[in-house]
Amino acid sequence: MTKQDWQTLSTLLTTPKKLVIVGHKNPDGDAVGSCLGLYWYLKRKGHDPVVLMPNDFPEFLKWMPGCQDIVIYEKEIEHTKELLEHAEMVFTLDFNALNRTGELGEVLASTKSIFVMIDHHQQPDHYAQFTYSDTTMSSTCEMVYHTIGALGDQNLISADIATNLYTGIMTDTGSFKFSATTPRTHRVVADLLEAGAVHHEIHHHIYDTQSPDRLRLLGKALANLVIRAEYNLAYITITQDELEAHNFKKGDTEGFVNYALSVAGVVFAVIFIENKNEGIIKMSLRSKGDFSVNDFARNYFHGGGHTNAAGGKFDGSMADAIAFLMKQVPQYKNQLNAI
């Protein structure tokens, strides 16, 4: 965004408007936190905002301030279409291609509103009139903090805004351990704590409320861990039957892939999760160093994300997905062994 863009956006927001804030499909802490953080800010500015998600989000996020007001597209399709039809501006957060919202993407593509994109993923599409894209940011929540500052409203950051933004930063940085965490990130977090975010309470809500079923599912996932030391690779598989045997709920597998990446010597980790309803194998990919799982996911698994964290999918069986992965990996052997 140029200085002129920020000034124009600020001018647009000087009068009350009907606004819709959209997150991506299968929303995580950063998507929910950034949308709700922006939601409370825009309410304080006198606007009429609504947060819209393509589908439901995990239970461990449902304590966040304002989450009870989120509209779920899959549950309220006609209401969603009506909201977008009357929206004067649409903010899209934590994604940079409309297909990241699933079926909602077609509705968004036909919406005539002014679009504002705020996102930190690589290779953004060009659908928005205002695009704030920065891949060096730890999270979209950090970018929402800077958005509020750029609009001259730092003083409007309330405890509800701070709580939501802190949650998204904490979850997207792996509790501040990922390489995208910068001195700038910590300065933002310090401001959020001063604005009313209570870090130990947020940590408790996210990490200390796990169900016995989720922990047993983690145990099964770790039992399925495969290590290919010759490639510094580890992968985990979870079948649909295994999910159902452990009463799977949305978000239960969040972070499982990081256990594979934590194995000594491993620099490339993948988790394969079977989804029979969609007929696909969902994948999360993680890496260390400069091996780009964003490029790998884009090239082979219809996905993308960040250099060290990406998602993808495979149309076929679990066995075929693993075989396809292992067909590609040997060409990267020297790169993986050099890290």
Image: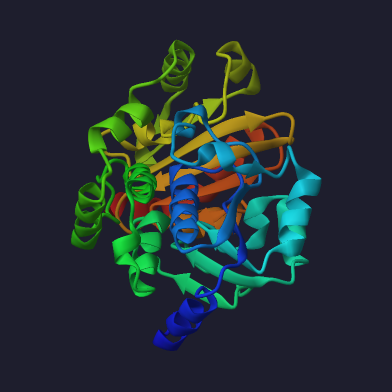
Q: Is residue 62 left or right of residue 81?
A: left
Q: Image point 28% across, 48% down: which residue?
A: 178
Query: Which sits in the foreground, 308 or 253?
Result: 253
Residue most toward the right?
78
Q: Image point 49% across, 81% down: which residue?
A: 11
Q: Where is residue 149 in the image (x, y as percent from the top left)?
A: 33, 69
- Image quarter of residue 2: bottom left
- Image quarter of residue 261: top left
Q: Is residue 71 left or right of residue 117?
A: right
Q: Is residue 64 left or right of residue 203?
A: right
Query: Which sits in the foreground, 277 or 88?
Result: 88
Query: Which sits in the foreground, 175 or 219?
Result: 175
Position above or below: 10 against 284: below
Q: Position of residue 210 (x, y in %)?
A: 41, 20
Q: Image point 26% across, 54% down: which residue?
A: 181
- Image quarter of residue 81: bottom right
Query: By what rule are the colours in the image chosen?
Result: rainbow
Position above or below: 28 against 293: above
Query: Which sits in the foreground, 233 or 301?
Result: 301
Give the quadrant of the N terminus: bottom left
> Total number of numbered labels?
0
Q: Where is residue 98 in the image (x, y as percent from the top left)?
A: 65, 61
Q: Where is residue 242 in the image (x, y as percent from the top left)?
A: 58, 17
Q: In this view, does 54 lie to the left or right of 204?
A: right
